[in-house]
């Protein structure tokens, strides 16, 4: 087992697989807007969806498995030294995660990597650490997990995680973990989805996880409370495109697995909508007037039918231009 060491450098093959949890959370977030307290918040509904969902594993390449069914997409690899997991989902899935990971390999969980601070990617940190894992994350992710943050769109105030769930290794520069005969290269993005996003690249397998800077076939959420922004999302898409080769398997934070061409299409969508919204805002239109003008219309059929509605995405873009 090798401790993280500084590194850098790039990346080849697309694939397609539907997210096991996606259908279950659509009803939870479709059209969600900041609102007063109600019987069930999007946060509550997503947790319930994870509690009901099956956790599945799908072999990709080079011993790397896609893990789905608890929050965002995850990836795992096993070797003689045990298991490594990128993102660890929602805590209610603990037992199902343990059962699924037995299909990846034997031995203890050695590392759990957080691509960013959101609970649907980090809520399993406590059980991962209890299993003996070293939790690795961007320094800003570690800070957010120890802070109190209100995310209106999810109807939830996040309070500091317990000491048993805190990050062990905080990074803010490219870092490599040698594991299972591969090299996992962690690269910080500039502030984008949040200010603590990491790309995780399995160099031998040529598999890139972007975390939530990429939502494949879905309008993404942008967390302005934690330092995100639409311009940063476009820059992060550019960075991911630069990391991906023609055969690279790219795993988004949400949505089906894809490849470099899908990232290019996503970047085009983001930049076009950003420009549309900025032009309307510069004309003096309010956010509600911009939403009524439908600046996302050309993309709604492909990107706007799932978790984040066209209206909510327009609202998020408006905030950042």
Image: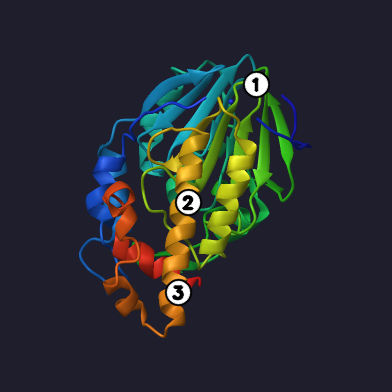
Q: Where does label 2 land, which residue?
A: 268
Residue at the right extreme, as displayed: 6
Q: Are marks 1 and 2 in contact (CB under 8 Å)?
A: no
Of residues 1 and 75, which is closer to you in this image? 75
Q: Where does label 1 land, which residue?
A: 204
Q: Nearer the viewer, mark 3 or mark 1?
A: 3
**Mark closest to the chain's N terminus, 2 or 3:** 2
What x and y, as percent, mark residue 113?
Answer: 59, 39
Q: Where does label 3 land, which residue?
A: 279
Tell me the element at label 3: helix
Q: How is the image coloured?
A: rainbow
Residue 309 image-quadrant placement: bottom left
**Mark closest to the chain's N terminus, 1 or 2:** 1
Decide: is 203 above or below 282.
above
Residue drawn at x 33%, y 49% is 303
Residue at the bottom extreme, as displayed: 284
Residue drawn at x 30%, y 60% is 297
């Amino acid at each position: 087992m090798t401790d993280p060491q500084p590194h850098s450098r790039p990346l080849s093959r697309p694939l397609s697989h539907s997210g096991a949890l996606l259908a279950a959370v659509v009803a939870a977030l479709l059209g969600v807007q900041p609102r007063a307290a109600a019987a069930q918040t999007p946060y509550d509904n997503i947790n319930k969806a994870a509690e009901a969902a099956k956790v599945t594993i799908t072999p990709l390449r080079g011993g790397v498995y896609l893990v789905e069914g608890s929050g965002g997409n995850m990836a795992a690899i096993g070797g003689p030294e045990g298991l490594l997991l990128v993102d660890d989902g929602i805590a209610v899935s603990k037992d199902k995660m343990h059962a699924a990971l037995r299909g990846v390999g034997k031995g203890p969980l050695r590392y759990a990597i957080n691509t960013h601070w959101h609970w649907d990617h980090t809520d399993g940190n406590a059980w991962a650490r209890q299993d003996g894992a070293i939790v690795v994350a961007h320094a800003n992710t570690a800070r957010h997990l120890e802070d109190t943050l209100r995310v209106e769109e999810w109807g939830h105030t996040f309070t500091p995680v317990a000491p048993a769930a805190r990050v062990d290794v905080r990074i803010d520069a490219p870092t490599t973990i040698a594991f299972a005969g591969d090299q996992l290269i962690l690269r910080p993005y500039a502030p984008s989805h949040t200010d603590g996003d990491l790309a995780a690249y399995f160099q031998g397998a040529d598999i890139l996880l972007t975390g939530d800077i990429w939502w494949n076939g879905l309008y993404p959420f942008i967390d302005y409370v934690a330092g995100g922004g639409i311009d940063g999302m476009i820059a992060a898409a550019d960075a991911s495109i630069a990391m991906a080769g023609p055969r690279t398997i790219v795993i988004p934070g949400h949505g089906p697995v894809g490849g470099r061409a899908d990232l290019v299409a996503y970047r085009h969508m983001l930049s076009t909508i950003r420009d549309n919204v900025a032009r309307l805002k510069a004309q003096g239109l309010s956010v509600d007037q911009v939403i009524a003008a439908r600046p996302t219309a050309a993309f709604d059929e492909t990107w706007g039918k799932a978790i984040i509605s066209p209206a909510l995405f327009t609202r998020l873009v408006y905030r950042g231009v």
